């Protein structure tokens, strides 16, 4: 079964952080904003950022997301300095898709939530017993699960609002697509589209970016950034099986809800 190099990159990155290699292949709460992430709140006392140790206590942990295994981000997140778009205004979008918190957080931490696999239903005793078509179907089904990287970041003052605004502005400014690279791996998104947010924080923005991976067609990647006071939660989700079968998927709602509950 042959696959494009982009899809192979997807498969690799899904188990070693949501890096650009994946992308190219494939609190004190105030009243809610309207989801615009514009941060037009009334003047507030300067907020003090949480420490890394405090964020570690707030991020989702093992056993806290039903139906998902939660643990460290395999392979870690890419170096911020090595994730760049050709147009700097698109950097916040690219950073979100690689699990990097936007702006200049004082502290941050990340986790990976992987959806539990369903029990196999194929009667074949081994992969060798399958026809090429059934083999490909079995592979796609085995990868039909959400993998979500969650990054919590805390900011001093109005840093969280400004960082979220930078993402919202980038989604609009880069709607026609953009190119970028991470560790020398280059790729191009053909479009960026805003989506409905799952999050229930003070403000949020959700979006998808699409990469045309040749014969495999348009491959979407989904992200969402939610503000809870002066903390931002960034979520990036990929489902390779859904991509391969053209099945729609979104940022994992159970993961977002579980994380939001710990930030209340």
Image: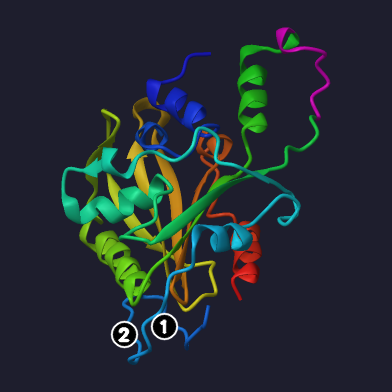
**Label located before the other in sequence (1 or 2):** 1
Q: Secondary structure at mark 2?
A: loop
**Looking at this rendering, what residue extends furthest in the left direction?**
87
- Residue at 63% from the left image edge and 65% from the top image edge: 257
Q: CA distance from mark 1 to mark 2?
A: 8 Å
**Residue 159 visible in image:** yes
Say whether residue 123 is magenta: yes
Provide the secondary structure element on which disc 1 rests: loop
Residue most extreme to the top: 128
Q: Quadrant of the C terminus?
A: bottom right
Which label sits on residue 152? none
Residue 94 spot, x, y in % from top left: 32, 48
Q: Tell me: 153 left or right of 212.
A: right
Residues at marks 1 and 2 touching, judged by CB atoms closer than 8 Å: yes
Q: How many marks?
A: 2
Residue 233 coordinates in the image, percent (x, y): 49, 62
Q: Looking at the magenta stretch, what is its main secondary structure?
A: loop
Which stretch appears magenta?
121-128
Mark 1 or 2, which is nearer the eye? 2
* Residue appearing at x 31%, y 77% in the figure: 38
Q: Which mark is residue 33?
A: 1
Residue at 72% of width from left, 7% of height from top? 128
Vertical order, 218 against 37 (above or below): above
**Horizontal and vertical percent position of residue 109:** 50, 53
Residue 235 visible (yes or no): no
Mark 2 highlights which residue? 40
């Amino acid at each position: 079964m042959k696959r494009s190099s982009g899809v192979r990159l997807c498969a690799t990155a899904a188990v070693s952080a949501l890096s650009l290699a994946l992308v190219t292949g494939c609190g004190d709460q105030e009243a809610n904003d309207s989801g615009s992430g514009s941060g037009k709140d009334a003047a507030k006392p300067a907020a003090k950022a949480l420490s890394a140790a405090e964020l570690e206590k707030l991020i989702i942990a093992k056993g806290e997301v039903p139906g998902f295994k939660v643990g460290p981000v395999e392979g870690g997140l890419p170096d911020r300095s090595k994730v760049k778009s050709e147009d700097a205004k698109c950097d916040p979008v690219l950073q979100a898709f690689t699990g990097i918190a936007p702006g200049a957080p004082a502290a941050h931490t990340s986790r990976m939530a992987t959806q539990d696999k369903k029990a196999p239903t194929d009667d074949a005793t081994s992969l060798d017993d399958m026809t090429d078509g059934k083999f490909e179907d079995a592979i796609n089904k085995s990868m039909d699960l959400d993998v979500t990287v969650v990054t919590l970041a805390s900011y001093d003052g109005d840093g969280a609002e400004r960082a979220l605004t930078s993402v919202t502005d980038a989604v609009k400014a880069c709607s026609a697509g953009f190119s970028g690279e991470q560790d020398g791996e280059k790729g191009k998104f053909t479009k960026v589209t805003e989506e409905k947010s799952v999050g229930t924080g003070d403000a949020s923005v959700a979006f998808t970016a699409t990469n045309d991976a040749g014969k495999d067609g348009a491959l979407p990647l989904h992200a969402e950034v939610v503000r809870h006071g002066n903390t931002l939660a960034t979520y990036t989700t990929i489902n390779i099986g859904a991509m391969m079968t053209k099945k729609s998927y979104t940022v994992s709602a159970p993961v977002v809800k579980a994380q939001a509950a710990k930030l209340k």
